[in-house]
């Protein structure tokens, strides 16, 4: 068990699925009874009926942009827009703000954001000193890492962001075993230390908050630091984490993850890129089918480290591809509405091309068979749904790239 945080990570997948689905009714009941927002969103839903993924798929997806708007509407009496079960008091030690502004609660639970698991996978152990360079100012990033480190038994230096020289001085004095923060700031620290002739004591790092491409991983590794990444958000905490195998990110044990077609709540087949939708089991902030706006895909197989949960490929871009065409916004949900009307369509992609002031809109559609007049009927639907005219291009199945995009802005902005 020394390679795993707990036995949950090596459960039989069928047992894990049973446990997650068994917890769903209670969490949906909590969302309905403890939060005014989900009382409205889930109106008419019987929690006892939501015991399968198919039943869960019938519930609406609440996306981050919607959460922001609902918070703004309720800000005078509830900064969380009715999404939190508690608003203030001893059970909520901290409140944070993310750009938008979106306010997030931090409850009193040990390892509230569930990041101890990711830190353990990155090689951190009880007694380690972690130099935490995530922000402690307004946003929850610093606390997301710190609370997980404390749950793991680690000590934390609250470095925060910026002040590179002072941080290097503290690192030299305290000699922490590892680093938590963005990969780009870790690179800055390593470069500045090299300029000064200073050798950083870091041997491991858990990075997040931005892309961690193989080139940057290899550069950091060449400087003696084993970098491991995790995917977490201020709304949900940890969603997935990397292991020593470096084959995708293993989904956290405390969330139920779906990958859906952007603009819809419809799950895509494993391997197809779509939006990450998460149901958390946090009673303080019980988000049900929360659309993160991030793209990823399920990675086939299980992790070579023995962890049995599903894996995702990591962050693959943003799902909110809303684009303005000839002065009108076109949304992924509108593309999805057009696709729903025609069972022949297997995959769709709206390509906006041309130069500024001369927008051209082309619907590229993979179809299983194309009866006479299909393109004309689709063109009529495009005009009805988007209020814009577009060209229809029927292509063979497998032609469009598997990148999660349903709207591609290919215009020239020179």
Image: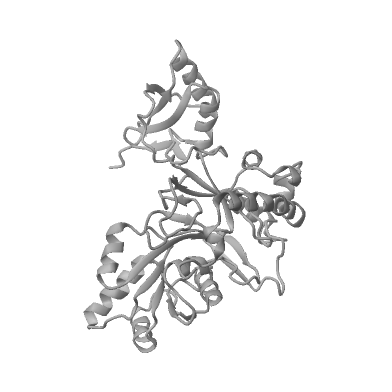
Position of 27 compared to 194: left or right?
right
| Residue lying at 44% horizontally and 10% vertically, measured from the top left | 372
Outermost residue to the bottom = 173
Residue at image x 30%, y 38%? 412
Evaluate whether residue 43 shows in this view: yes
Viewer-nearest residue: 24 or 323: 24
- Where, quadrant-wise, is the C terminus in this rendering? top left
Number of numbered discs: 0
Inspect this view and state whether residue 331 appears: no
- Relative height, residue 337 to residue 83 (above, below): above
Residue 46 position within the rendered picture, expressed as x and y whole percent measured from the top left: 76, 43
**In the image, residue 301 lies at what x, y percent?**
43, 47
Determine whether, in the image, residue 394 is placed left or right of residue 35: left
Residue at image position (42%, 32%) is 349
Q: Residue 371 at what x, y percent from top left?
A: 45, 12
For residue 187, which quarter of the picture? bottom left
Residue 272 figure quarter: top left
- Image check: 322 left or right of 42? left
Q: Specify the farthest residue to the top.
A: 372
User: In the image shown, does 259 or 184 lie closer to the viewer?
Assistant: 259
Specify the color scheme.
one colour
Q: Position of residue 270 (x, y in %)?
A: 47, 41
Measured along the vertical axis of the image, is residue 146 above or below residue 376?
below
């Amino acid at each position: 068990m020394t390679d795993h945080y707990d036995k949950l990570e090596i459960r039989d997948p069928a047992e894990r699925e049973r446990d997650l689905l068994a917890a769903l009714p209670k969490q949906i009941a909590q969302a309905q009874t403890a939060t005014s927002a989900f009382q409205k969103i889930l109106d008419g839903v019987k929690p006892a009926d939501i015991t399968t993924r198919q039943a869960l798929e019938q519930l609406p997806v609440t996306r981050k942009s919607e959460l922001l708007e609902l918070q703004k509407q309720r800000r005078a009496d509830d900064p969380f827009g009715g999404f939190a079960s508690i608003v203030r008091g001893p059970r909520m030690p901290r409140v944070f703000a993310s750009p938008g502004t979106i306010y997030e609660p931090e409850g009193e639970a040990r390892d509230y954001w569930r990041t101890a698991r990711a830190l353990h996978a990155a090689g951190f152990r009880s007694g380690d000193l972690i130099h935490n360079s995530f922000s402690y100012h307004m946003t929850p990033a610093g606390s997301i890492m710190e609370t997980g480190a404390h749950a793991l038994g680690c000590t934390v230096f609250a470095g925060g962001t910026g002040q590179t020289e002072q941080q290097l001085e503290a690192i030299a004095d305290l000699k922490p075993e590892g680093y938590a923060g963005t990969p780009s700031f870790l690179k800055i620290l390593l470069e500045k230390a090299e300029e000064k002739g200073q050798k950083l004591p870091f041997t491991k790092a858990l990075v997040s908050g931005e892309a961690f491409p193989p080139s940057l991983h290899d550069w950091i590794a060449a400087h003696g630091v084993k970098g491991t990444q995790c995917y977490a958000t201020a709304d949900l905490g940890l969603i997935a984490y990397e292991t020593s195998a470096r084959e995708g990110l293993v989904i956290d044990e405390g969330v139920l993850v779906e990958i859906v077609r952007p603009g819809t709540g419809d799950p895509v087949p494993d391997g197809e890129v779509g939006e990450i939708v998460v149901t958390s089991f946090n009673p303080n902030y019980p988000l049900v089918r929360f659309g993160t706006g991030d793209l990823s895909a399920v990675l086939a197989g299980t992790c070579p480290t023995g962890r049995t949960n599903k894996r995702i490929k990591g962050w693959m871009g943003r799902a909110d591809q809303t684009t303005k065409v000839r002065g009108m916004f076109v949304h992924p949900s509108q593309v999805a509405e057009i696709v729903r009307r025609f069972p022949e369509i297997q995959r769709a992609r709206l390509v906006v091309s041309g130069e500024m002031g001369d927008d051209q809109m082309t619907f590229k559609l993979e179809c299983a068979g194309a009866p006479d007049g299909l393109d004309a009927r689709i063109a009529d639907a495009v005009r009805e749904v988007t209020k814009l005219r577009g060209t229809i291009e029927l292509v063979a199945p497998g032609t469009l790239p598997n990148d999660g995009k349903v709207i591609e802005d290919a215009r020239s902005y020179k």
